[in-house]
Amino acid sequence: MTPGGLLDTGLLAVVLALLCVVTLALLARERRETRRLRTQQVPLTSPHSDPGRQRRAAIVVNPSKFTGLDENALRRRQAYVAAVFRSHGWDDPLWLETTPTEPGQRQAREAVDRGVEVVVAAGGDGTVRAVGEGLAGTSTPMALLPAGTANLLARNLDVPHTDLAAALDLVFSAQDQRVDVGWLEVDRSGRDAEPERHLFLVMAGLGFDAAMMAGVEDRLKARLGYGAYVVSGARALWGPQAKVQIAVDGGAPAVSRTRAVIVGNCGKLTRQLVLMPDAEIDDGFLDAVVLSPRGGIGWGEVAWAIATRDRRGQRRVQHLRGRRFEVRCGEPQEVELDGDPIGPARRITLSVEPGVLLVRCPPLHP
């Protein structure tokens, strides 16, 4: 290896080490906040209470997030949640389990048809996204009981993602906020007559981030939690740059050689790690970041720009904003949707639909 190659390798190792340290520090801080929240008493009154009739919620649950090695874990969780609803004067919730072929859209629509007051998504980001898709355009709000590894929407909406009692309290104490949703069209071949269409709530994109998500093993997630993404990211760093064309709001496409194009409805990865500082989930726009590092020094520049929440952009990190993005690739690139890999594609189109989803959560702009 040349001296320059050794230098890049050494710098990259330092960057990765720093990212690992930052990630672990942020997770430790969130655990301390969780312990603080657990000391707060859950109120037994609700701004949504109606003495005229007994209310009911539906809980769309991904059972795979609760069973694990303990087959009774979900049953105990259901009993606890039902007791909390009864303590607030609500009826026992309607439980609707997801399956690999029906991840939540149908269950959410069934809940609306049965006249529930709120639909609670109990699972990871995939379950949240599916329930959101089923509720978009309706007057029924979605609440969150996070049970995944990343819990990206919960982090962006300041919903407690490691404390069930605190998250459940928001079902009764929080107001409904109107938010935007994003739509992703996936053209696998670049010439598909009917591209796949998916809703996303947080981020979608292609390149490095999607390859990182695709490389996360379930076994590693069970052992390391959020740290599994750090390990997978280290593996994906060495991929080549891809030639892409990016068009914003129907304008002329700009050609770029990049490692990742990420388009966000909101921009937070953790409480302190923000990929798109100007992204707001209710502003009617999508924000994008184009990452173009080369070698260890380039990744160092990317890490510094993200850590300092640089809004100006620079040669390795470009920020874009619009209502519609079209990204074309010379070669198929891995695509991700709210942290879930969905396979490679040559073209993706991302657009925003403003204010069509109600979410019960803390104020968006306190």
Image (cartoon, helix red, strand yellow):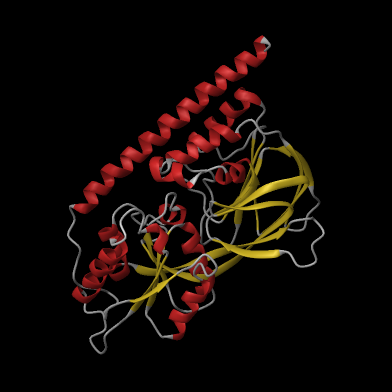
Q: Which picture quadrant has residue 330?
A: top right
Which residue is at the front of the view, 161 or 305? 161
Residue 256: x %, y % from top left: 75, 39
With respect to residue 110, does 357 lie above or below?
A: above
Residue 209: x %, y % from top left: 59, 43
Query: Residue placed at 27% from the left, 78% from the top?
Result: 92
Residue 132: x %, y % from top left: 50, 68
Which residue is at the front of the view, 364 or 331? 331
With respect to residue 276, does 64 lie above or below?
A: below
Q: Quadrant of the C terminus?
A: bottom left
Query: Residue placed at 60% from the left, 46% from the top?
Result: 210
Residue 7: x %, y % from top left: 61, 14
The residue most toward the top is 3
Which residue is at the front of the view, 287 or 65? 65
Q: Quadrant of the N terminus?
A: top right
Query: Residue placed at 42% from the left, 85% from the top?
Result: 114
